[in-house]
Amino acid sequence: MKLDGLELWLDPVARSGPESMAVDEWLLGLGRPILRVYRWQGEWGTLGYFDSLSQAQASFPEIQQWVRRWTGGGTVDHRHDWPYTLLIPSVGSDQRLGGAESYLLIHKALLDALEPEALDARLCGGDKQTGDATCFDNPVTHDLVNGTGKKIAGAGQKRTKAGLLHQGSVALPLDGMASEKRAKRMADALSQKKWAAFNEEPPASALRQLQLRYEDADWLGKRP
């Protein structure tokens, strides 16, 4: 997958779970291909859209702050990960790709980005799928695993009329310069031409309005 006009945002603001989810939804509405790499404010876990909050809390009793994503996928412990989001507008390359195809091509780009880090990463064929609700205990087809078969990268996706929202997590630390270099390598792998730096700030009023859903106790607690 090669995106025309990709922008890379190394989000400098550490954000809460609800605020971060709201930022991603706002970015999708811009209608441009954007890769966002970011940090969490505090220790957070996220639930996939169909996940059970009580089950997540039982699996990770040490995590006190939870937010439900708009995307699918499993429960993720974000205390020690490298989180990123990719937004692809419906008028772009993703228009011709199904879910499995886009998941594969995005993870191929991530694989290219991780190659210099000697992680022995590879695409998973789906033979190790467990069905576990915890994301990193359930390597599905086209996830990234290491040489022992342990999952090191996964994601959840959501398609809307605006385009594709892909929220990913890599089991690597947010390590300053290493993180920035990794983000730029991934942008290189995804971009048709040289990518541009994203330099907008979400409008406070729009962000607050979107954030209300992710702060809502009913949204967090429900299992659709």
Image: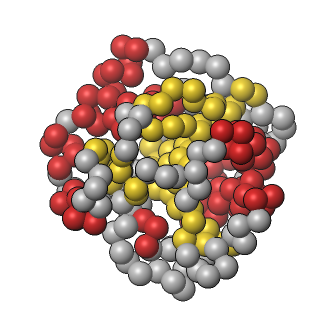
Residue 186 lies, with reference to residue 213, above or below; the image says below
| Residue 8 appears in view | yes
Q: Quadrant of the C terminus?
A: bottom left
Work out which residue is located at the far right of the displayed protein and give it. Answer: 193
Work out which residue is located at the far bottom of the displayed protein and give it. Answer: 127
- Residue at point 68%, 33% (across, down): 8
- Residue at point 47%, 80% (across, down): 129
Residue 106 lies, with reference to residue 160, above or below; the image says below
Tell whether 36 sits left or right of 139. right
User: To which quarter of the image does residue 144 belong?
Assistant: bottom right
Q: Position of residue 181 (x, y in %)?
A: 75, 42
The mark tally for this picture is 0
Q: Position of residue 115 (x, y in %)?
A: 78, 61
Tell whether 83 sits left or right of 178. left
Q: Position of residue 38 (x, y in %)?
A: 54, 37
Residue 123 lies, with reference to residue 89, above or below; the image says below
Q: Colour mode?
A: secondary structure
Residue 148 lies, with reference to residue 12, above or below; the image says below
| Residue 86 appears in view | no
Q: Position of residue 110 (x, y in %)?
A: 68, 56
User: To which quarter of the image does residue 122 belong?
Assistant: bottom right
- Residue at point 18%, 60% (across, down): 54
- Residue at point 45%, 14% (across, down): 203
